[in-house]
Image (cartoon, grey):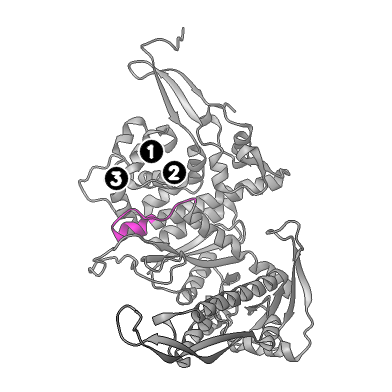
Amino acid sequence: MFDPEDPMLQLESLEVGAVPVVAHFLELLDFEAIIERHLPPKRLGRRSEIPRGKVLSVMVINILLSRSPLYAVPEWLDGFVPEHFGIDASQRAFFNDDRLGRALDHAFLCNLASLTTDMVVRAIRRFGLDLDQLHNDSTSVTMHGEYRGQDEVKAKQPPWITFGFNKDHRPDLKQLVFELSVTADGAVPIHFRIHDGNVTDDQTHADTWKALRDLRGNPNFLYVADSKLCVSNTIRMIAREQGTFLTVMPRTRAEDKWFKQHLRDHVVDWKEVRRVKNSRDTNGPEIVYRACESPQLSKEGFRIFWYCSSQKREDDSNRRFKKMNKARSRIDALAGREGRYRFRSVEAAREAVNNVLGELNVKRFLKVRIVEHRFEEFVQDGPGRPGPDTRYRREEIPRLVFEVEDDQQALREEANNDGLFPLITNSKAFTPAEALDKYKYQPYLEKRHEQLKSVLGVAPVLVKKPERVAALLLLDFLSLLVFSLIERTVRREMKRRGIASLPLYPEERICRAPTADLVLGAFAGCRRHRFLRPDGRPVRVFHDPLSDTARTLLDLLGVDSKPYGIQA
């Protein structure tokens, strides 16, 4: 008879967590088989206690559940039930930082494009992803090391870790550029590339579009990206190849200046095309979008849609007046200089004022008049402390007065442009409303970048070799792919079954659109307990009970409940 107080028995408690959930999706992607197929051949005579694909799959699970540096992964793994990783207890000893590092070295040597294409094609077929509309953007992955010696000649050169336009607002640190393309069907990543740290988006879109065309098998998809896509050679190439694009037109183009002049001289027939709730203020007014098509085509012959957003109109006005107030404060500080910091000439003061106005980009809206006044002061004649016999002389001291005035005409003209933004496309079928709806999916891609940096913790990258940095970013992409598929599956099943929300937030608050981190977090802390005999044989096995929400998630995801001690 089982006695839990028997001193000969040992209690073993290991975490199950969300490992079976992630392992289920890795199995659906045939992750380990695809990885092994693309890894370089192993050296002859080298004994391998565990497949490299298994090592990399464990690293992906670690990234998704609790990202750790390489040296901490073995300790993390020791706290989990090994069978759910597809290994036994004896194989856990083979996971050390050297083996993990070598697995990254092998992953770097594989053909990155072929591996990701095979994995994505598997995801497309297994999950029925829609590739009719694809969105592209990039972000910077900030590095916190020197990464010297990158100029060594190597058979395969990793991306160059260097300084560039840092989107994390850290221009003092080196970086790589992480480019990502996602579907408009759940924002699932289907293509990524790692670029040198000083590469800009306008250099990448042509090759990316061709890669997406090859992945889909034809050019019959909509390619959506931000303003860096609006390069004449790139958009002409897409149109010439029978593709369709949609992007924001930069303010630097002549068409922008032409339309704003047209807006001042003509009455434009704006029509409402979209009305949504204000997410910033639930009690505030709705956000209204009005649109019109420009009577002038772009210089390449493509259509331009102009939009006016009520929220952007307010934001533009507030931003402008904040800059103007900041400029006034800084000009007041210039006027208050005394002593040796006082301006000695009107020209020097004018230069300082122009620097302030130019830096804040408000030169058009503020008129600054500098007037010189002269005052008489008595100044001690000679050095030393003043005494009863000290002589003083009368001097004229120039004083500069700064008179700041708003340019009302320029402010009225600029107010007419508040809230405006243009989209350019070669589609002849889109209405302004359809084009706006399609472009408005772009923030879902930006959310993937945010999740890459926050939930998946892409930085800091705690490895020294650039080759291993590149391999880790490959695993980050594959982790983001699994992350997105979990999220997409839950949301689609909730919609199909008419489930409006799940209590996934703290204090069981409802969540209408679960993210994968909330889904995986519902299983955190679930453990398997075993009473073991001295020879290691289990006497009794039991699990922590799962919450009703976690049980619902297993059903929505189609994950077997047996790893959690629940018999079907």
Residue 381 bears which disc, if any?
Answer: none
How far from the left and from the top, in percent, is residue 100?
31, 47
Q: Is residue 52 one of those drawn in magenta?
A: no
Task: Give SS at disc 1.
Answer: helix
Above or below: residue 541 compared with residue 85 = above
Q: Nearer the viewer, residue 128 or 365?
A: 365
Query: Magenta segment range?
Result: 455-472
Residue at the disc numbered 2:
66
How far from the left and from the top, in percent, is residue 421?
65, 77
Residue that extends furthest to the front in the rendered view of this protein: 388
Above or below: residue 475 compared with residue 136 = above
Residue at (35% x, 79% y) in the render: 386
Above or below: residue 454 compared with residue 184 = above
Residue 97 bears which disc, if any?
Answer: 3
Please, what is the three-letter code of the amino acid marked with disc 1? Trp
Please, what is the three-letter code of the amino acid marked with disc 3? Asp
Tell me, yes or no, whether the two marked residues, 1 and 3, touch with CB atoms within 8 Å: no
Please, what is the three-letter code of the amino acid marked with disc 2? Ser
- Regarding residue 435, the answer to whether it shows in the image is no
How much space separates mark 2 and mark 1, taking CA atoms?
8 Å
Tell me, yes or no, whether the two marked residues, 2 and 1, touch with CB atoms within 8 Å: yes
How far from the left and from the top, in percent, is residue 369?
57, 90
Q: Residues within 10 Å of mark 3 (few under 14, many from 20)?
A: some
Tell me, yes or no, whether the two marked residues, 2 and 3, touch with CB atoms within 8 Å: no
Residue at the disc numbered 1:
76
Residue at (51% x, 81% y) in the render: 335
**Is 232 on the left or on the right of 162, as rendered?**
right
Residue that extends furthest to the top in the rendered view of this protein: 1
